Each structure stands twice: as structure tokens, then as C-alpha cells.
Image (cartoon, rainbow, N blue to C red):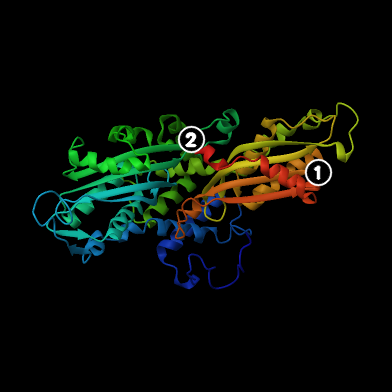
């Protein structure tokens, strides 16, 4: 996507608001300066087109995504409690006296305190009213969002939502279940060696108070019974210890050595991330955040261009030998269509420094007498362009042009991707998906060929990497 006039005093409109540069707060400016250090550490020029406004975009996204630090539950709940009587004969539970209330499937996002990457969560929250009063249903969602918009881990997030609602509503009990999804971003070496890399870590946590204080209480049976239609079962709920040990991929023991090496090699970048934490109102010395700067830098260095260039140049040697014809090249009409579908990729949006991920489908006509391209070669091309600061449109074009340069022309590429920036900023469009197409040679002039290739792509392909 093209950027707007970079010289204009006002920053481009995002989320329906226009921000004048002169009105930026000190915290925003500090985050911008830190992001410039990170871009320089990647060998990038933050003044190039596409990156000029990245520091501001990142600052706005982070501050928007952590606005919960400045919000108070009391301000939300106060004035939203309404009188509601129970059953007239006093037998049973209903209304404002003991009738279970659940709000299901609240789509939220939060930032992982261990690596600063956003994670998705589906929140189910319920309470048992008491005192003949109920709370406005929207307030349950808003209270959950207050704590989600902070640096978090799943169990603490569930506990804080539960505790805040219990003290704010004063019900007989509160129950919270969170289904959390954290991206497991591979590094270049691991994804080339392991084509079956699992791209996600999923956990399910719960928290309860009052009548939900005991995990074996009857109230939980009612709560979970109403969730069974959403595929949530109690045996999938992890204990607190299991979440602490398995949640964030960046905190695994296998990554500790790499993180230590990066701290020594990139002290300016690590210090820049610590500065971002302070600008968000956090303490970088809090025990849960001590390793966060090194975790974030380790992840960000996946997108350093120089190492990737050497890898591809080394890999590309001998490609011409692989494609030598077995005989005389046939005419255009005798070309055969080949395809490689569902090649997983991971990349980094250069506008917001947030991940996007999905699958690539490649179709091409290969003349008779020439061997078709191997899957490993196409996968390497995809990862070569994926592990960069990117935009999806450019990624699609670069893959198509590279494959075309090898084969000599007729190539079609479809990229389907989910963008973290579509959920972890003000727009919050959960479940959205972006598809882009590049067509070269015969595909650009032959609608039947395009249709044939598109029909070969299976339905709901992006779900395969979840």
C-alpha cells in the first residue's frame, strides 16, 4: 500500500482520527526514537518509503494496545448496576438472586509480557447475581478489555478479570475462562529444516470466585454446560503451573542461550525495548519483564536482511542445472500446468512491526522436457521473501517474479494471510483475511488458466497453519 504525502504536517488518518505531529506526547516520541534504533539494528533506513511513518505507527499501536493501564474498573461498573428481583415465591434461582449470567465468545487481544507480541483470546465470563441487582452486559466485556489492554500472561489476565468483577459487582460468584492463542514464530533455520513447524501455542485457563471458588463446585458444571456448544471442555483447562511453563515460545529454555548472545551483540536494541516498556508505564526490572527486551530483539532479528541474502545466494547456485531440459523444449501449447499449494509462510509488516502469516499457492506452466520445480525450492523462495520487513502485495509480486525468472514466464501466485495489525490496533477486525494475486505470462491473458488454478486451491487454507 502506498503511503500518503510524507511531508504533510498531519499524520495520515488511522482509526478515523488525524493526529497532528505537534501534538504528540513525550511517551509517543520516546517510543518512536526507540523504534528507529530497532530499525537501524536491522540494517534498515527508517527514512525510506514505507518506513518513514513506521515509528509513529508502532508507537500508536503499542499505546492503544496498553491503554488499560490508565482505565479503572470502578468508572466502568459504577452506574451500570440495575435492580432486578428474583423469583416471587423464593424457590429456585433467577434474575437478580442467583440466576447464572454468561457472556460468551468475547474476542479480545493482549500483548504477551514475555515477548511483546500480541496474542488473541476468546473470553467467556459469567457471574451469579446477588442483592437483587444485575450489571449491564456490555460492562463484562469492557472490564475484560481493561485488563487485556496491558502486558499480560493468560492466568494473571483471567485472575484480574475475575477479581475486578467480583469486587465491582459484589455477586455470589464470578467465573472466567480464556482460550488463548500465541503465535510461535520460527527462525529461518528451523523453518527450512522443519516444514511441519507448529505455528501456534494454545492454552485454556480459568479463574473463579465465590460460588466458583472451588473447581468442583456445582456452579462450574452449569457454567461449563452452557459452554459446551462452543467446544470448551473442562479437561482442556490447564493448571497454573503448566501455563507458566508452556505459554510463550520465547521463554523456553532452548531460547535462553540465543537471547543471551543477542543481548551482548545488540545492546542498543535491547536498551531501546526497555525504553519502550518504560514509556508504556511498565517497570523493565519487574521480574516478569527482565528478559522481555532480549526476547523481543531475538524475534525481530529474524528479519535482518544480510543473512538471508547470503543464504539465498548459496542456495541458488546450481538452479540452472536442476532445470536443464531433458530434451527439446515444447511449444507454448504443449506446456503443462503444475502447482504447489499451501506453502506456509511467516512475515513482518513493515508498517507496524507486527507479524502476518498464512499460505502461498504457486501455479506455473512448465514446458515438456523440463523438470517441474521441487517443493523445497519453492518453499525456500517463499521463506526468503517472507523473512523480511514486508507488505503482502510486495511479497506476492516478489515470489512470482522469482519463480518466473527461473521458468521463463508463466506463473500465478496467490497469498492468503492473517495480519496481526488487523486485530491488535483500533480496528480490531477478528477473523479477517487478506488475499493477493500476481499473474505473469500466460496467466495474465488466459482467464481459463487462472480459473483452473484458483479452483485447485482448497477451501479455508489459512486454517491449516493454526
Identify which residue is drawn at 50% across, 65% down.
Answer: 14
Q: Quick one: 191 or 450, which is closer to the camera?
A: 450
Q: Are marks 2 and 1 in contact (CB under 8 Å)?
A: no
Q: Nearer the viewer, residue 205 or 401?
A: 205
Residue under the image location 75 percent in, 43 percent down? 411
Measuring from the top left, give residue 113's x and y in whole percent. Answer: 37, 45
Q: Check the image and report above or below for 82 versus 119.
A: below
Q: Residue furthest left?
A: 90
Q: Nearer the viewer, residue 325 or 251?
A: 325
**Which quadrant would residue 424 be assigned to in this image?**
bottom left
Whether residue 100 sits left or right of residue 87 in the image: it is: right
Residue 168: give x, y in percent of width and height: 19, 57
Give the farthest residue toward the front.
Answer: 89
Horizontal and vertical percent for residue 55?
Answer: 51, 58
Say which element carries label 2: helix
* Tag 1 secondary structure: loop
Determine the CA span between mark 2 and mark 1. Answer: 44 Å
> Is residue 284 shown to the viewer in this render?
no
**Which residue is label 2 attached to?**
261
Residue matched to label 1: 409
Q: Quadrant of residue 67?
A: bottom left
Is 309 above or below relative to 103? Answer: above
Answer left or right for 379 relative to 229: right
In the image, 50 versus 106, the foreground residue is 106
Residue in view at x 80 percent, y 51 percent: 445
Q: Is residue 49 above or below residue 338?
A: below
Amino acid at each position: 500500500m502506498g503511503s500518503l504525502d510524507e511531508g504533510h504536517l498531519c499524520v495520515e488518518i488511522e482509526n478515523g482520527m488525524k493526529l497532528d505531529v505537534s501534538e504528540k506526547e513525550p511517551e509517543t516520541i520516546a517510543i518512536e526514537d526507540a523504534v528507529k534504533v530497532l530499525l537501524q539494528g536491522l540494517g534498515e533506513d527508517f527514512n525510506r518509503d514505507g518506513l518513514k511513518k513506521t515509528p509513529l505507527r508502532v508507537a500508536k499501536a503499542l499505546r492503544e494496545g496498553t491503554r488499560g493501564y490508565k482505565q479503572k474498573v470502578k468508572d466502568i461498573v459504577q452506574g451500570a448496576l440495575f435492580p432486578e428481583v428474583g423469583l416471587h415465591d423464593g424457590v429456585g434461582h433467577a434474575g437478580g438472586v442467583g440466576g447464572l449470567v454468561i457472556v460468551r465468545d468475547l474476542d479480545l487481544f493482549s500483548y504477551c509480557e514475555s515477548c511483546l507480541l500480541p496474542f488473541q483470546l476468546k473470553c467467556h465470563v459469567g457471574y451469579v447475581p446477588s442483592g437483587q441487582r444485575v450489571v449491564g452486559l456490555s460492562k463484562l466485556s469492557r472490564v475484560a478489555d481493561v485488563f487485556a489492554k496491558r502486558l499480560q500472561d493468560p492466568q494473571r489476565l483471567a485472575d484480574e478479570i475475575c477479581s475486578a468483577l467480583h469486587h465491582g459487582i459484589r455477586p455470589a460468584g464470578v467465573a472466567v475462562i480464556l482460550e488463548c492463542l500465541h503465535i510461535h514464530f520460527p527462525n529461518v533455520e528451523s523453518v527450512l529444516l522443519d516444514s511441519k513447524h507448529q505455528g501456534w501455542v494454545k492454552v485454556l485457563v480459568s479463574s473463579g470466585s465465590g460460588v466458583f471458588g472451588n473447581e468442583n463446585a456445582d456452579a462450574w458444571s452449569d457454567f461449563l454446560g452452557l459452554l459446551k456448544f462452543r467446544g470448551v471442555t473442562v479437561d482442556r483447562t490447564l493448571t497454573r503451573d503448566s501455563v507458566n511453563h508452556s505459554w510463550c515460545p520465547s521463554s523456553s529454555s532452548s531460547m535462553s542461550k540465543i537471547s543471551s548472545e543477542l543481548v551482548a551483540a545488540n545492546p542498543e536494541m535491547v536498551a531501546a525495548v526497555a525504553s519502550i516498556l518504560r514509556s508504556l508505564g511498565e517497570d523493565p526490572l519487574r521480574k516478569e519483564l527482565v528478559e522481555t527486551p532480549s526476547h523481543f530483539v531475538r524475534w525481530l532479528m529474524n528479519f535482518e536482511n544480510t543473512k538471508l541474502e547470503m543464504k539465498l545466494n548459496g542456495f541458488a547456485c546450481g538452479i540452472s542445472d536442476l532445470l536443464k531440459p531433458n530434451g527439446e523444449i515444447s511449444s507454448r501449447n504443449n506446456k503443462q500446468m503444475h502447482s504447489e499449494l499451501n506453502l506456509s509462510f511467516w512475515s513482518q509488516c513493515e508498517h507496524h512491526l507486527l507479524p502476518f502469516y498464512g499460505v502461498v499457492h504457486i501455479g506455473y506452466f512448465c514446458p515438456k522436457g523440463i523438470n517441474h520445480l521441487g517443493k523445497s525450492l519453492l518453499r525456500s523462495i517463499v521463506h526468503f521473501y517472507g523473512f523480511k520487513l514486508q507488505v503482502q502485495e510486495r511479497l506476492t509480486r516478489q515470489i512470482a517474479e522469482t519463480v518466473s525468472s527461473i521458468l521463463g514466464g508463466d506463473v500465478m501466485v496467490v497469498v492468503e494471510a492473517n495480519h496481526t495489525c488487523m486485530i491488535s490496533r483500533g480496528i480490531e477486525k477478528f477473523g479477517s483475511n487478506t488475499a493477493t494475486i500476481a499473474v505473469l505470462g500466460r496467466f495474465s491473458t488466459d482467464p481459463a488458466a487462472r480459473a483452473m488454478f484458483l479452483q485447485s486451491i482448497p477451501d479455508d487454507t489459512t486454517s491449516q497453519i493454526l
